[in-house]
Amino acid sequence: MLFVSVVWFASSRRTAERKLHAQTESLRVTLASIGDAVIATNNEGVITFLNSAAEQLTGWTQEDARHRPIHEVLHVIGEDTRKRVANAFEIARKAGDANRQGNRSILIAKDGREVHIEDSGALIKDLAGNVIGVIMVFHDIGEQRKAELERERLLASERAARTEAEASDRLKDEFLATVSHELRTPLNAILGWAATLNLMDQDEQTLRRGLTTIERNAKAQAQIIKDILDVSRIAAGKLKLELQPTDFAKILRSAVDSLSPSAAAKSLQIIVSIDSEPALVVGDPDRLQQIILNLVANAIKFTNNQGQIDIRLRRVDSNLELMVRDTGIGISREFLPHVFERFRQADASITRAHSGLGLGLAIVRHLVELHRGTVSAMSEGNGYGSTFAIRLPVASKMMGATSAEIEVKMSEAVQARAHALDDLNGLRVLVVDDEADTLEMLCVMLQESGAHVRSASSTMDALRIFGEWQPNVLLSDLGMPGEDGYTLIQQIRALPRELGGAIPAAALTAHTRAEDRERVLASGYQAHISKPVDLTTLLTSLSQLAGGKESTDYADYTDKTA
């Protein structure tokens, strides 16, 4: 009986061992075949099992990894810190049954590869509840992480773009408010004095004072409009230069002289030092003067009474360097990187101490760059003054082998302009404009320059005078009621040449966009002159027309005013 029991017990044990082995093999096959990587360790963290997915991610084979400590095979670092962090075994042992799932880290594989993984760990317990090891499951989340990072990048980019758009809208709103204020201020003085002078007879002193104030404020308003138009042309890439050999030192002296009254009104001392003469560059004289005027006017504006402005012109290698240094209010470190930007002012509030649109320095930067130069600003901060420096390339030898040759060419260019003004003597000019004040002003300007002038306020009157008088040049406004300036030029161009159909003609208009200019030239006019009218520009343009140049020459010339 005892023998039977022993046999039965041995048979049962073998059966149990076979079942346990079968279950173990089944578990191993299951763990080996699943897609996630699996590593099992004993209670001391020594690896006992590694499936094929874990082999691929870690770079360790099961044969090499078995009996090794887990931290050698599952070496993980933080994504942000790039320092070693706890792996799933260490987290599971520390957390126990409350272990944290879904931990993310970067796995450093045996061959040095970096794999973004998400892992989790669980304790292995026997039937008695004793911990006998840890099983870890992890998988590659590289593509998922890339998608998340790209989504984060797009969201950050969208937030930045929205912030920039909001800032841009705010700056434009502030700019429009400033424009409104700056235009209304001189307009208020103009209208106020005009109304005062019309109320009753005024003594000569009051009359002179009023007219002077009106003229000063009208010029200020015209400058504001000019700055806005310049910025518009710059933004559209339509601003052109009339390049010629130019003595920069001469322009500097002239600009400083013109601003001397403004400096004297604040008791400012302006010291000019010119170390390079002649200071020859290839540039547009008017635009170069605009650069200097903007820089020096800016220094005068932001320098307190009794202050000092130092202006130095010198040659540095193959460049001319102009430095304008003041003892004024300075520029904060925060605003300094934005000082040349459009629509930006250090103080755009209604309580600001200084007027202006904040466009002057933006225009300076663009004009300097158009002359292939550079501009910079320096300041130690509020209360420490400012220094602006521009560098322009000197005149190249393509215009002359020596300074003397360049000076000769420069002199020839100046003389050519003077001769152009002489050509107006005796010139018959027909001026057409429906605004009586403008018409009278144009006639006076041209008559004072030696031209014979007849005027007309409509297309019908202009055609009548045209047939009777046969002028040499036509100057016509475009925006007139009824038949406008385009109709007038069409009817004139329809005439035979012997009746004046080929007369040189210039259009006068407040529309200054590139498309406006193109339409003007296509309609039959050879020149496009913008309002408000600059006397020198007007006379030079009419002289060019009277000289019989090709229309392409007029187009090149009027690029500056278009």
Image (tube, rainbow, N blue to C red):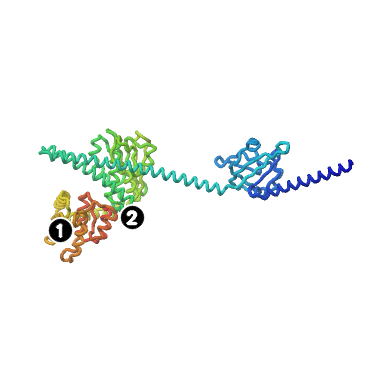
Foreground residue among 241 and 282? 241
* Lateral position of residue 150 relative to residue 334, left or right: right
The answer to which quarter of the image holds residue 543 is: bottom left
Question: Eyeballing the image, is 307 above or below 519?
Answer: above
Residue 244 in view in this figure? no
Could you tell whether 2 is left or right of 297 in the image? right
User: What residue does disc 2 label?
Assistant: 397
Camera-nearest residue between 341 and 364? 341
Observer-nearest residue: 554 or 516? 516
In percent of the image, x 39 and y 38: which residue is there?
334
Instruction: Inspect the image, locate mark 2, and give the three-letter code of the amino acid beneath it.
Output: Lys
The residue indicated by pointer 1 is 460
Locate the N terminus and report the quarter of the image it occupies: top right
Q: Quadrant of residue 203?
A: top left
User: Mark 2 or mark 1, which is nearer the start of the sequence?
Assistant: 2
Q: 255 left or right of 383? A: left
- Pointer 2: residues within 10 angstroms few (<14), some, or many (20+)? few
> In x, y percent, where is residue 240?
30, 53
The residue closer to the viewer here, 15 or 63, is 15
Q: Which mark is residue 57?
A: none
Q: Which x, y percent locates residue 286? A: 26, 49
